[in-house]
Image: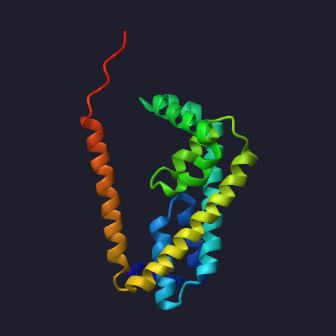
Amino acid sequence: MAEIERIWSEWGHLAYVGAFLWSFFEGETFVLLASALGHATGLVNPWVLMVTVWIGSFLGDQCWFYLGRRYGVRIVRRIPGAEAKVARTIEFVERFGPVFILSFRFAYGIRNVASVACGMTRMSYFYFAGLNFIAAGIWAASFVAAGWFLAALFGAERIGWVLGGIGLFVIGGMIYRARATRKRPAPAPTT
């Protein structure tokens, strides 16, 4: 938290450019901490932060969509084992289209991959852009509000510990899930 406070103190309004760039790629933790900082110190305007990360997140996903549309198939063919995984993801995108687009950014670590997969489908650029704009706004508002209210609930001094605990819980769940998946016996081949 102290690092983000230093950034906003030294950079002033240019720190919003950093928030834009961070959200272009991912940014959940940064947005939560910046919003919490705004509540605790008044250095960060939550409305400006929300609009900044909304636009950054939207444009980042549009970029990944374009890269998936333009280069996705060629890149996937070069990565061993990726074709089957991407095929399953594309099947999921085509099956749950709008719901998938509105929700994938809330699943940590798959946002960019999901946008690439959407780009590899027959989905139109404008259809994706419209739903992506709405989803980015929901994401930005959710994380700015969560950071703001978590800081109000736990205090600025403890927000780092709370977010760290949440992060450890999520990582622990992912590790548990990965291990449980590995322990399952492989399905018997059908003849």
Residue at figure coordinates x 31%, y 46% from the top left: 177
Total marks placed: 0
Q: Quadrant of the C terminus?
A: top left
Colour treatment of the image: rainbow
State whether residue 140 appears in this view. yes
Does 6 appear above or below 183? below
Choose top left, top right, bottom left or bottom right for residue 95: top right
Residue at figure coordinates x 44%, y 79% from the top left: 150
Query: Where is residue 156 drawn, in percent x and y?
Result: 40, 85
Q: Residue furthest top?
A: 191
Query: Where is residue 166 drawn, in percent x and y?
Result: 35, 67
Query: Where is residue 6 drawn, in percent x and y?
Result: 44, 84
Q: Quadrant of the N terminus?
A: bottom left
Does 79 appear above or below 145? above
State whether residue 79 appears in this view. no
Q: Nearer the viewer, residue 105 or 15?
A: 105
Q: Nearer the viewer, residue 27 or 10?
A: 27
Residue at figure coordinates x 52%, y 70% from the top left: 143
Q: Residue furthest right?
A: 126
Q: Residue furthest left?
A: 183
Query: Where is residue 55 drawn, in percent x and y?
Result: 66, 65
Does 59 appear above or below 80? below
Residue at figure coordinates x 50%, y 80% from the top left: 148
Q: Is residue 29 left or right of residue 140?
A: left
Q: Is residue 112 left or right of residue 122?
A: left
